[in-house]
Amino acid sequence: MNVCQQCGACCASLRVDFHPAELADGAYAWGAGVPVTMTLPLTPAMVRMKGTDDAVPRCVALLGEIGVAVNCAIYDGRPSPCREFSTEHDACRRARQRCGLPPLAD
């Protein structure tokens, strides 16, 4: 199990906005794409994963318990911001801190 499958802090801390072409009914390059029902329209060129801008954020696709065991319900079709995110981002450190998790070892 990699550290991300135990963590999930990014999925409970960050907004996830992306182009509608990544939706399941679009021309998505990976997997089936993001189900439209898991998103909110923002503009004609931008959608957001539901739950990621709630007062207590948690992506609608996140399954499991943060810091224990998590996974993404749409992992193969997850949007580009999720694909591009890495534990090397400072945002990862901040998300872990926000969720009460210790920093990752270097």
Image: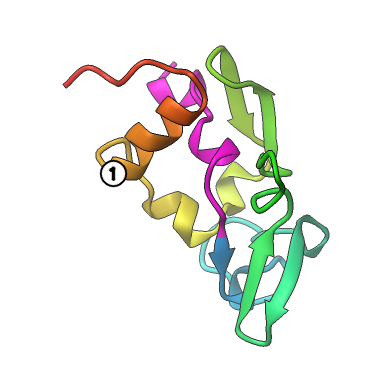
Image position of 56 with respect to 36: above or below: above
Amino acid at the residue labelled 1:
His
Horizontal and vertical percent for residue 25? 74, 73
The verdict on residue 15 being magenta is yes
Horizontal and vertical percent for residue 60? 73, 44
Image position of 94 with respect to 80: above or below: above
Image position of 27 with respect to 18: above or below: below
For the N terminus, the quadrant is top left
Q: Which residue is rendered at x = 59% and y = 56% of the image?
A: 31
In the image, is 42 to the left or to the right of 77? right
Q: Which residue is rendered at x = 59% and y = 21% of the image?
A: 66
Q: Quadrant of residue 18?
A: bottom right
In the image, is 96 to the left or to the right of 36? left
How is the rendered protein coloured? rainbow
Q: Which residue is rendered at x = 59% and y = 37% of the image?
A: 12
User: In front: 36, or 11?
Assistant: 11
For the C terminus, the quadrant is top left
Horizontal and vertical percent for residue 22? 60, 69
Image position of 83 with respect to 39: above or below: above
Q: In the displayed orientation, state which residue is furthest to the top.
A: 68
Q: Is residue 10 visible?
A: yes
Q: Is residue 27 visible?
A: no
Most frequent secondary structure within the magenta stretch: loop
Which stretch did the figure color magenta? 1-16
In the image, is 63 to the left or to the right of 82? right
The verdict on residue 79 being magenta is no
Name the residue that disc number 1 marks: 89
Badge 1: few (under 14), some or many (20 or more) residues near its Cα, within 10 Å?
few
